[in-house]
Image: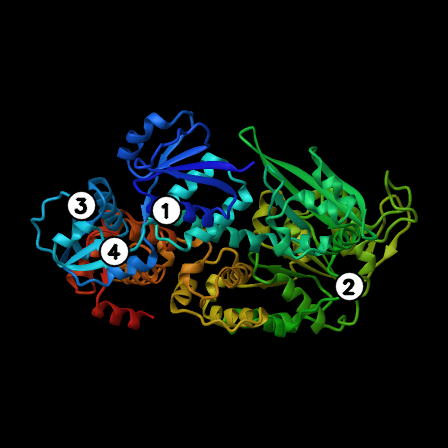
Amino acid sequence: MKKKVTILVIEDKIGNYFLEQLKDIFENTIEISYFTPNMANKPYIYSTDLILYTDPSILIEMMGYIKCNAPTLMMKRTISKQSMEKLRSLEVNKSAYVANINNFMANETLATIYSLGIENIKLYPYYEGAPNTKKVDYIITPHEFDCIKKIKGQVIDIGNRLFDISTILDIIAYLNIDRKLSDKIIKKYSSKVPTFWKGLKNTLYDKKMLSGQLDVVLNEFDNGVILCDENELIVLCNNKAAEILNINKVYLEDDYLNNLLKRDKVLNVLTSKEEMHDEIIDFKNKKLIVTMKKVIYDEVYFGKLIILKYYNELLKKQQKIHNKLVGKGYYSKYNFDSIIGKHPDLIDAIEISKKISNSSSSVLLIGESGTGKELFAGAIHNYSERKNKPFIAINCATLPENLLESELFGYEEGAFTGARKGGKIGVFEKANNGTLFLDEIGEMPLNLQARLLRALQEKEIMRIGGDSIIKVNVRIIAATNKDLFKMVNDGLFRDDLFYRLNIFQINIPPLRNRKSDIKILTKYFLNEFNDKRIINNSFNEFCIKYDWPGNIRELKNIIEYVLKISNEPLKIENLPKYLKNPKYFKTSTTLDKEQLILKILDKRKEKCLGTGRRGIHEEFNKTYYKITEKEIRNLINTLKDKGYIKINLGRNGCQLTEKGYKKLDILY
């Protein structure tokens, strides 16, 4: 049954206008009627879901005819974007009457115009019976009322006023409109009208940004992801989910979960009220693993999260993870050309590595996380006489002690519960005549260090649960980001193993000590991502100031992040939030902060956002770093004194001058 809305208006013409407007906005999904005080034989209002009225006097006059307990709502109205631009174009420092049918309406229209930031002219209310004491240039009116014939001035017809988006939201809430329809209404209507409700404008913008960011994040998952609300409406999904279900993502989102059942009854499982974990179903001749989790916050149910994955893809992924833990295949794809940079310290490390490549003695690579230790290990192997033999890498920090031991030395059948039938060879045997790369050697437990030392000294091993000696010819390259010498002194690393490994020590410089290579690396990663993005000076300045604790890996991650979230050049404004710190910006002087404010004013003007002090303060904190409102005020006053900006009242508080735009051209 359709919900009913009753409108109380002053005359039929206005009533018909509102009736048609609401029908259009709500797509004929609600029943609408209107009443006026001048109706002959005014009917009583016995049944309705919501009563709208234009001003308090109408409600008071009609109160005796309302015979139900329906909620009442006074309409907030605005003007069209076209009318707003018409008013903005009026000559500055002129005056105008705002004429309407009565005192309340005239003042309400006047307040609406001011609230939308139209402050270039002085406004006075005018209505039937109002004193005509002002000499004005314009008469602003939604209709050419008879009363305006008594006054002089150019008539500016702003047309019938429209419902403000805040009133539409209130109607949606009172009538409990379906979420799918309400989202459609809000998106469609908010693009048509300006609003004095700044919070809504920011909320819609933030929601759009968040939706875009979530879309990027969800599409990074290998599994299909579907997020439903409490009514089982699909609010978000990723491309993988659309691929698995063989439904276009556009049609999948904003549809109800029940509609999927029409395509395949097997999907009944998705409508279950209970959580499930890794349930296997047969879907389109493939095994599909389904996981469902309820989304509950503060004991309130908000919907559910559905994760879909193909069984065979899961097996492949597990194998891939195993290969990453145990080794990355039996070869290395790296050579010395894979090591990018021209810094003398890096070149020295490369030259030493080349010289010791053909030796069979152990190598110890010392370097912070992300400096490229595995690149050096692979390059040394591929430069040596062992290049056509196996290269196996294992991370000593990723496995618990018992698993690490079995991966290194292997085991015999029946060595322990769950041991594979026939046993398993370890990486020492797999790497025979080749190279074994032991990454994060500093994390190896002391008990295992003793077994490793024996293997290095005697060049032989024994499998777990076995009793035979196996000869191995393996060159060890170990790597660490820890101070092994200190660990030896602290009793955390065996001294005899340290000296056995530390025959050839290669020190790989951290990125902060070779910042001259950052531009080279940045261009290399852009090429790797197949992107020809321009690099802004602000990004280069950041790279020089930042210490790069994550080294080259962190640089690559940051570049990938910036490329994903923005189509703009690489610049400091698009850096991840954790890097928004004043010490990384070129802001050592007040002059530099002034330049950032000029950029903010230009950006907010392009987006039709307010340029008052508060808006500038919020934008500065969001885009750059935290700064006090007092400091913003001082900077704005300085820019005004220099002639770069002029300060007005209201939302358009600060505007760039011609001199300011010229300064911006220099900055960009």
- Other-residue count near label 2 (Cα within 10 Å), few / some / many at <14 / 14–19 / ≥20: some
Label 2 vs 3, first from the N-terminus: 3
Amino acid type, mark 2 = Tyr
Q: Which residue is mark 3?
A: 127
Label 2: element kind:
loop
Quadrant in which the C terminus appears: bottom left
User: Whole-Å distance between the Cαs marked 1 and 3?
Assistant: 22 Å
247 left or right of 136?
right
Q: Earlier in the sequence, mark 4 or mark 2?
A: 2
Count residues near mark 1 (Cα–Cα under 10 Å), then give few for <14, some for 14-19, many for 20+. Answer: many
Q: Are marks 2 and 3 in contact (CB under 8 Å)?
A: no
Residue with the mark numbered 4: 652
- Relative depth, front residue between 21 and 166: 21
Q: Amino acid at mark 3?
A: Tyr
- Residue 614, compared with residue 248, is above or below; it is above
Disc 1 marks which residue?
163
Marks 1, 4: nearer the viewer: 1
Q: CA distance from mark 2 to mark 1?
A: 69 Å
Q: CA distance from mark 1 to mark 4?
A: 24 Å
